[in-house]
Amino acid sequence: MKTETDFAKHLSKFLSEYLPYERNMSPNTVASYRDTFVQYITYMKDVQNVKVEQLTLDMLTRHRVLDFLSWVQKERSCGIATRNQRLASILSFVSYLQYEEIQHLAEWQKIRSIKAMKDEKKSISYLTTEGIKLLLEQPDSTSRNGCRNLALLALMYDTGARVQEMIDLTPESLSIESKPYTIRLFGKGRKARVVPLMEEQIVILKQYMEENHLFESNKQKHPLFFNSRKEKLTRAGITYILKTYADMARQVNRELLPCVISCHSLRHSRAMHLLQSGVNIVYIRDLLGHTSIQTTDIYARTDSKQKREALEKSYVDLVPEKSRKRDWERNQGLLDWLKSLQK
């Protein structure tokens, strides 16, 4: 920023030094925080008539933060999740300010008392194994783009990777020269995890990499999945690829593909299929890169089929004999039974 206000000074330090180096947050997380303050600066200019050159820390108050969050929902048509995300960014900034600008400590504590809104729990969207199979049958593996897209979608499902984790992959992320085959993914907070790969996946991946010369030593830091300009794919690009093949799959069997599908649907699908196969939820947590088992537990709560089968296996017949239905209730209609009493 070109202005010298205390707000500009601390916000610049917060985004460029504190988050990436002291908190070790990924560039994508920092970008999300930056977007929050771009919106806050826009709100101050358009609603409060305060230009960025005039914006100071004493203008950051609990009342204004609440008004900004309301503006995000009403004027920007954002949902509760986005509202809460904007609040989390501001709370992190305020926590930082508590040690940098202690003269405003009372106001920082008031802002920190703002609570996130409760969001309605949405059901998880995932595909059946038959749906995944149908989806992966759509790319034409004989064409260059089709081969890339098949390798991309198959790998995204097999690893349960987030879309950004797929974007950031390079050939050096892979260990596929010999068994055990693995891939290193970098998730939220730059946390790395190693995920095993199945042999079927390796066949598809090697074919794609050989066709694009990605085994060469000078390509090790090159994007694993790239566009015609040799640049790594974007979120929008991968989403477009997925939706294109989802539309094709619906023409074959509409029942196997949900009306709304996202890249995260493949991640959800992988988790649900592992759970339904009896894989321990702790291993699923590690595969997905969740920090807490409670995050992964949502899949167990969603899987009604597994719940029913578990209850059926544990059922013990304790119903007293006298409370069971009588023969006439099981084998005869009520009218026939009444008639038999007259004989």
Image: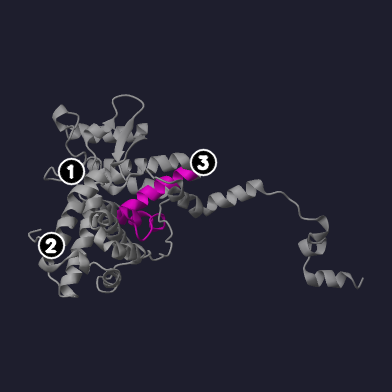
Predominant SS of the magenta segment: helix
Between label 3 and label 2, give the one nearer the viewer.
2
Q: Position of residue 258 (x, y in %)?
A: 38, 58
Instruction: Count neighbours of disc 2 (C-alpha within 10 A) and say few if under 14, some if 14 to 19, many if 20 or more.
Output: some
Instruction: Count neighbours of disc 3 (C-alpha within 10 A) and say few if under 14, some if 14 to 19, many if 20 or more.
Output: few
Q: Which residue is mark 2?
A: 5
Q: Which residue is mark 1?
A: 226
Residue 329: tell me if it is visible. Answer: yes
Q: Residue at x 43, y 50 (%)?
A: 295
From this viewpoint, which residue is outermost toward the front?
Answer: 103
- Rounded to the nearest angstrom, the CA distance separating label 3 from label 1 is 36 Å
User: Residue flagged by tag 3: what amino acid is it?
Assistant: Gly
Q: Position of residue 47 (x, y in %)?
A: 19, 75
Q: Are marks 3 and 2 in contact (CB under 8 Å)?
A: no
- Rounded to the nearest angstrom, the CA distance separating label 3 from label 2 is 58 Å
State the residue in front, 113 or 197.
113
Q: Residue at x 31, y 41 (%)?
A: 191
Q: Residue at x 15, y 75 (%)?
A: 49
Q: Which residue is mark 3?
A: 278
Q: Position of residue 44 (x, y in %)?
A: 18, 70
Q: Which residues are magenta?
A: 246-275
